[in-house]
Amino acid sequence: MSRGALPKGFGELEPYVAWALPTERERIAMRETSQMQDIIAFHDAMHARLEAIVEYLGRGPYPDMPDDARRLHDMALSLVEVSGLVEMYKDPAVLNMVGPDRFVSFE
Amino acid sequence: MQTRLIDKQWTAKYPDVGHGPVSTEPCISPAFFERERDQIFRRHWINMGRVDEIPAAGDYFVRDFAVCRTSVLVVRGRDGVVRAFHNVCPHRGNILVWEERGRCPGRFGCNFHSWAFTPEGELAAVPDETNFHDLDKSERGLTPIHCDIWEGFIFINLSDEPQESLREFLGGVATQLDGAPFDRMRLLRTYKVEEAANWKTAIDAQNELYHLPFQHRYTIGDAFLLKDGKFCRFSDVNLYNYHSVWSCEWNPAHVELPTEALINKLDRAVNSVRVTQRISDFDWYLIFPNMALLLFAGVSGDFFLTYNFWPLAVDRCIWEMRYYFPPAENAGQRLAQEWSIGRLRDTLMEDAYAHESIQKGLTARARPDMVMQDEEITIRYFHETIEREMART
């Protein structure tokens, strides 16, 4: 994704725009195929700006919004997706779970 | 705090329920499963979905109700009435509608010979009609299934004549939840998992919180009030003629994770929905036979879930989970909703894994029985209700 994909003021999050995923299935797939260190880097960068992101999105229309705002919105949903792993489980192997290939999400 | 952190209080409230061992046979016997098809699933009211899935005239959805070998078509007529039919063409038995949901384009047409039906189930047109002998179209419409609605939840009953009305069947559940604002919420997420487990094994595993601090120690182990900081205690249990509900309080000592704390701080629901009919912070209803209704007091507003457990075989079922929230008005509210969904989802993925291992263990017949503590009383009551209904003539 090229520079300028996100609204002005959020430039330092541009390296993480691959996490701008609109569906849960895509966000889970991204989490499962990413290296833990990259997930942590994404998490930390987003966590630091989440309040500003919510405040920025709150100033514009909802749910319809321009593409650059939409990317920020979906990256915030991705933060939610990875937060349990980074902050609590720390290692996906500790969870005895039926995986998302069988536990299927529909939106 | 309404919860009494003591032992054996629910058996004291409901002494007739008893506290001895419970047979494992209903969860593992193929013969028992075969009898359940009619005794449990054909003679009671079964939830198929909600009215907001079919808001406009002609809207429909189809349920594969496998345990009764029936495909059910639920459709909103042009008169606004919601009806259920066997999804079968009355000509020679072909399945009529092959999509899971949609809007009827004027007529439902059978793939086989193009017989056409209105959204009200009437036979509208038969190609080459003059070549039939004494065909009375008014007697060849779609076969209706008894269908009724309570607070937006659509139920069907496959009996020729239901032994009680939907309202009589729901009983105390309806009394408790009449007027609850389900209609202000919308389906935001659905999950389906096909499991190698008996439908009752799956229900039993969800029908208690005793397991929470142990099985879910990495996910939501400390979410609800704990006795001595260790063991869950309900704040209330209520048993009805068929159904049951347990209730519990959020744990004020729960430690919020960093993102969780931030999201709760940023959640700004403008028009919050509060379900005043809630008994406590979290109510878990078993609506006999195969549905659960979960009501949650969220940080800035309430939400609910439904589980439907669809039996396929004695050791196979589909667990369907649906999450309902008020439509989010801003990003902060939407993030809080996604947090609730994801947190619960991971927990339920742990549960689904356990269902399959439990079924394996029961099938081995290592013991013919299970033993249950006081906080597992609604599981015992469910098994007693199953046995009572299986014995009915």
Image (spheres, coloured by chain):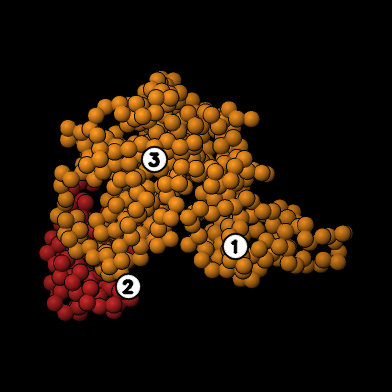
Chain colours: A red, B orange
The location of residue B105, given as percent across then percent down, is 61, 71
Checking the image for residue B245, the label placed there is: 3
Q: Which residue is drawn at 39% across and 24% down?
A: B15
Answer with left or right where residue B82 lies relative to residue A45.
Answer: right
- Mark 1 crowd level (few <14, some 14–19, many ≥20, 10 Å Cα): few
Q: Residue at x 48, y 62 (%)?
A: B52
* Residue A78 found in image quarter: bottom left
For label 2, the residue is A63
For label 1, the residue is B81
Q: Which of B367 and A42 is in front in this view?
A: B367
Real-space Cα separation, disc 3 to disc 1, in angstroms: 31 Å
Examine the rendering and report whether any part of residue B33 can be seen.
yes
- Mark 3 crowd level (few <14, some 14–19, many ≥20, 10 Å Cα): many
Real-space Cα separation, disc 3 to disc 2, in angstroms: 36 Å
Amino acid found under the numbered disc labelled 1 = Val
* Residue B222 found in image quarter: top left
Q: Residue at x 54, y 43 (%)?
A: B168
